[in-house]
Image (cartoon, grey):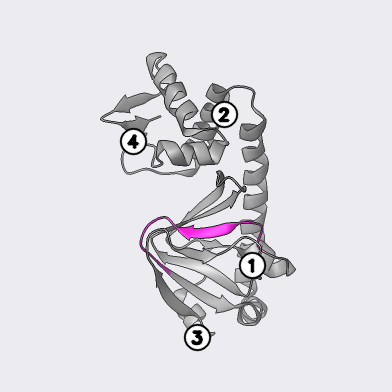
Amino acid sequence: MQIDYNILITYGGVARKFAKDAIIFHEGGTPLFYYQVVEGSVKIFASNADGKELIQGVFSTGQSFGEPPLMVGKCYPTTAQALTSSVVIKIARENLLEILKTYPDIAERLLFTFAERIYNKSAAAQVWVSATPEEKIMLFLKRLNTRLVSTTAGLVPYTRQQIADFTGLRVETVIRTLVRMSKKGMVKIIDHKLYY
């Protein structure tokens, strides 16, 4: 969801630069702010003690992230990290609530954003319960294809590692599976780039 930049600034929003790989908030932390990407991209992920990540979402220019724990007052279940050099605006929870009272259209859009994310989480669960790596990757690519409008037709904008992190597979498994899928004509690999 995107709230107009000028509204965010008027209500006390502060823009901050984050270097690539910088942590914006940590799993287990207390949510105090609404975050919206002004420039760049941010991933939300959960990780285990071994450092294995499961990417829950990637957010780019104009998109907000981290609102559910902020709204319900519970600790972050995930970590947010800048995927690229990014500018993120943040605004205190109290000020966000004031915006939602003052601008009911923004509150309505936030409701629809939450509904869309719940739907996407349900669809993502199909990937996690699929039996084979090929099924997991195909479901991931199909979901991605419906959500992204790529400037290069069919180019998958994620690395093999990121695909592994989205699907819960090991990167080696993703690489082997994509090679098999390429031989079957299900995907194309051109100059190490993946097309679907």
Residue named by callout 1: 29
Q: Of the residues under marks 1 and 4, which one precedes in the sequence?
A: 1
Q: Residue 187 location, x and y as percent?
A: 40, 24
For discs 2 and 3, the disc positioned in front in the rendered view:
2
Cα distance, mark 3 to mark 1?
Answer: 27 Å
- Against 113, is 12 above or below? below
Q: Secondary structure at mark 3?
A: helix
Q: Of the residues under marks 1 and 2, which one precedes in the sequence?
A: 1
Residue named by callout 2: 136
Residue named by callout 3: 10
Residue named by callout 4: 153
Magenta residue check for 84:
yes
Q: Secondary structure at mark 1?
A: loop
| Disc 2 to disc 3: CB gap under 8 Å | no
Residues shaded magenta: 76-87
Q: Secondary structure at mark 4?
A: loop
Q: Residue at x 64, y 75 (%)?
A: 100
Quarter of the image for residue 130 reads top right
For discs 1 and 2, the disc positioned in front in the rendered view:
1
Q: Name the quarter where the N terminus is drawn.
A: bottom right
- Against 13, is 54 above or below? above
Residue type of the residue flagged with mark 4: Ala
Q: Residue 80 location, x and y as percent?
A: 53, 60
Name the residue at the top extreme. 184
